[in-house]
Amino acid sequence: MGFTAVLAWAGFILASLPYINKIGPLAVAILLAVFYRHFFGYPEPIRNGIQFSAKKLLRLAIILFGLKLNIGVILQEGAPLLLRDFLVICFSIGLMILLARLFKADDSLSVLLGIGTGVCGASAIAAVSPILKAKEEDTAISAGIISIVGTLFAVGYTIIRPLLPFDAEAYGMWVGLSLHEVAHVALAGAPAGEDGLGMALLGKLGRVFLLVPLSLLLIWVMKRKGKQEEGNQITFPWFLIGFILMSLFGSYIEGRFFVISDEMMNGISTMTSFLLTMAMVGLGLSVSVKDVRQKALKPMLLLMITSVLLSLITYWMV
């Protein structure tokens, strides 16, 4: 575990440097792990600790991530917001699957990237991977790709913002509906001021909210598949219950019955990001550079196409 923590810490340090800070610590740490595996091999003597980070710490990070989801605010906005978020998720997943079949891309990577694009980037990929029984390598590759591509789009949004015929709130909603991760939404929404950023995060949190019903749907699909393929049974991902409970706690208990200081909430948020980065290091160590060249090029190009089309469609939805 300490080894994954060191690489995660190195990722945070490197991600604080100019230009690299646009990519974020998660993608940087995954790349560090991949390069370590490529040049030094997998550290077999500490495999158990690495696997603990990749699996157990990953689930803990997803549970803590629930604190960022304010269910009350989303429910106040009602059906129109959730309908648009629902359409975004369906479009992203459906188009990635369609393009993967047309261009014979890797199915597992394409599905994970579609879910990450539609919901909330690497966090969504990490949450659904156990349900889909995705390989650790596919999970790490998908998380790294979507972090890098999402960052490129977020930077691009900030460049073209002055040219768009949007007010701050409309621009923010477009950002929240179309960009990949919460960090990307915050990066692109910040130049629009508090109103624009608020709308951006609101649009994004609606997509995060739909992660739970999407996961339940995937469980149902995998169970049906398991009945057709004997021995391929899916176990319920109980960490999703923790995600829901933390969301309910942050939405309805914290701030009413007792207050957690901003400093502590920021600390929890940082710890969540660090645990998720440690988990991604563990997953990244399972990635073979040779396999990345063979498997990831087409899905990455298809992700770019899907992201461009999603931006165009959501532009007209705002």
Image: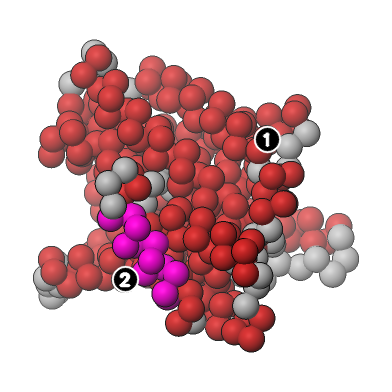
Q: State which quadrant residue 296 falls in.
A: top right
- Look at the image and say whether residue 247 sits in the magenta stretch: no
- Which residue corresponds to the image point at 67% horizontal and 49% vertical from the top-left? 292
Quarter of the picture holding the C terminus: top left
**Is residue 271 shown left or right of residue 217?**
left
**Is residue 39 shown left or right of residue 266?**
right
Residue 183 visible in the displayed image: no
Estimate the x, y position of residue 83 in percent, counting from the top left: 42, 34
Residue 190 visible in the displayed image: yes
Residue 271, label in figure: 2
Disc 1 target residue: 298
Q: CA distance from mark 1 to mark 2?
A: 34 Å
Query: Circles 1 and 2: CB distance less than 8 Å?
Result: no
Residue furthest to the front: 39
- Which residue corresponds to the image point at 38% horizontal and 66% vertical from the top-left? 10
Under mark 2, the amino acid is: Met
- Which residue corresponds to the image point at 27% horizontal and 41% vertical from the top-left? 187
Closer to the eye: label 1 or 2:
1
Q: What kind of element bears circle 1?
A: helix
- Look at the image and say whether residue 11 sits in the magenta stretch: yes
- Which residue corresponds to the image point at 62% horizontal and 69% vertical from the top-left? 40
> Which residues, given as a range, are shown in magenta?
5-16
Main secondary structure found in the magenta portion: helix
Location of residue 102 with respect to 4 vertically, above or below? above
Estimate the x, y position of residue 175 in percent, counting from the top left: 32, 32
